[in-house]
Amino acid sequence: MKILVIEDEPAINRQLVDAFKEANYAVDSTGDGEEGEYMGETGSYDAIILDLGLPGKDGISVLKSWRAGGVTTPVLILTARGVWSERVEGIDAGADDYVAKPYQIEEVLARIRALVRRAAGHVSSEITCGPLRLDTKSTRVTVEGNPVKLTSLEYRLLSYLLHHMGRVVSRSELVEHLYEQDFDRDSNTIEVFIGRLRKKLGVDVIKTVRGLGYCAEDPAQVDGKAAADS
């Protein structure tokens, strides 16, 4: 999973970036409104954190431009505490949620998790696929109750597939959502990480759809559908 942080105060920007990286997100960031607008238009992000008081172009204008251009990425705006008009203006411009400064970083993490879940059609912080469970709050992965230790990139890959369970995800889409902007990307490595994930999980929940990509599916549902069709 990957997010974009647009915040011009260096200390806050760094705090957000560090917190989300520690929570196993890939993170791109900028402190400029115009650059942030371009990144949000051209990049593939699962959510965006947007400050309103930005140099170059203010956050409300950036947000309106995205929505007018068809960018549907969930956006969490950062507003000044007590300035209710900023919150109203942000929501009306197309924001999905807001957090007032100063904030607790745990609240920002929780709100982004909720936005990503809702965008993917999930209501719970725990995503289940057969015997596999992924807790988006604790980043804990278990199979039949037994913990599975994953690297940060393996976790992001599994999380993205489970958030989009039942849908075929191409290698190029996975690359866009797993790696940060300045990372040396290679779509061929996706096959390597898929192989590692399958070995660590030990259950057949990640299907290869030849020529198209990969799909996370509940084995019981697949077997039930096959039985019904036969």
Image: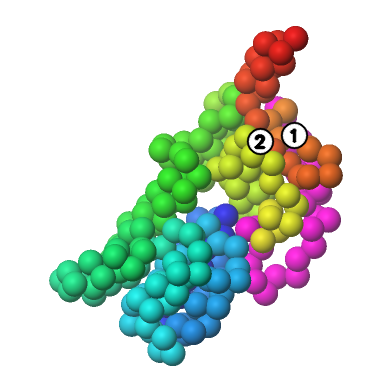
Q: Badge 1, how many Cα within 10 Å: few under 14, some, many 20+?
A: some
Residues marked 2 and 1 touching at CB (< 8 Å): yes
What's the coloring here?
A: rainbow
Q: Which residue is mark 1?
A: 207
227 relative to 73, above or below? above
Amino acid residing under circle 1: Lys
Q: Which contiguous range is marked in magenta?
A: 177-203
Which image quarter is the C terminus in? top right
Q: Quadrant of residue 173?
A: bottom right
Q: Residue at x 68, y 21 (%)?
A: 222
46 relative to 200, above or below? below
Residue 86 point in image, percent of width and height: 24, 73
Q: Does the magenta portion include 91?
A: no
Residue 77 point in image, percent of width and height: 35, 67
Amino acid residing under circle 2: Ala
- 95 horizontally vs 24: left or right: left
Which sits earlier in the primary sequence, circle 2 or circle 1?
1
- 163 horizontally vs 95: left or right: right
Q: CA distance from mark 2 to mark 1?
A: 6 Å
Residue closer to the observer: 209 or 30: 209
Residue closer to the observer: 70 or 7: 70
Q: Residue at x 65, y 49 (%)?
A: 157
User: Residue 216, which numbered label?
Assistant: 2
Which image quarter is the N terminus in? bottom right
Q: Residue at x 47, y 48 (%)?
A: 119
190 relative to 99, above or below? above
Q: Is residue 29 at least partly visible in the picture?
A: yes
Residue 181 point in image, percent of width and height: 64, 71
